[in-house]
Image (cartoon, rainbow, N blue to C red):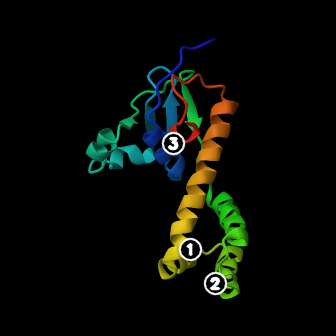
Amino acid sequence: MKRKPIKVDWDELESAFNNKSEELRYYLDLVNGHVVLEGEGELDLDDDDDAMVARGMRIAVTSGEGTRVVIDPPGDEQKLVWLDQFLAGAGCSAAIVAEFQRAIEAADIAAIRELMQEHADVRDAWYVYRSERLREQIDRWIETHELQLSEPPPWRS
C-alpha cells in the first residue's frame, strides 16, 4: 500500500535512535510522522511525560499494527565498533588509544565514559563521529523501510 509522504521531526527521530532502553520500544507512526513509545517502562515515566511531550514524543496507548515502523537503535556492541573505528583515525596519542582499546576489549562502558571525561578533546570529536554514524544508520533505516518523506533529513540538505 502506497502511503502519502510523512513529515518527520528529525530531532525526535534522532533522539529515539540514540536511546537504547531494554524496556522501551520506539516506533515511527506512518500516519502522522510522530515517534511513539511503548513498553513496560512507560507507566513509570510520570515525571518525564511532560518532557517527552514537549520534545514531541507521544506515549503510545494502543498498538498501531501496520501503521508503525520499529526504530532499532544501535546497541553497545555497534557503538564499540564505531569507537574502535573512530580511534583508528582520530590522531590520538598511542597511550590514549591503548587506554580506550583496553576498555573496548573489556566492553567496559563505565571505563569508556570515564576516559571520555578525562579527554575532552577526544570526547568532543567522538560525539561528532558518533552523530555521523547514527545519521548514516537512520538513512539506511529509511531506505530499508522505503519511507516516503515530505522533506529530506537536514543532514542531507
Residue 25, label in figure: 3
Q: For the residue carrying disc 2, how many other residues have a C-alpha within 10 Å: few (<14), some (14-19), or many (20+)?
A: few
Which residue is under mark 1? 122
Q: Name the one closer to the observer, 9 or 91.
A: 91
Figure quadrant of residue 35: top left
Dot 2 or dot 1, earlier in sequence = 2
Between circles 2 and 3, the one closer to the viewer is 2
Which residue is under mark 2? 96
Query: What is the C-alpha distance between the residues marked 3 and 1?
Result: 31 Å
Q: Name the one closer to the observer, 24 or 4.
A: 4
Q: Is residue 34 left or right of residue 98?
A: left
Query: What is the C-alpha distance between the residues marked 2 and 3?
Result: 36 Å
Which residue reaches farthest top? Answer: 1
Q: Name the one closer to the observer, 138 or 89.
A: 89
Q: Quadrant of the C terminus?
A: top right
Dot 3 or dot 1, earlier in sequence = 3
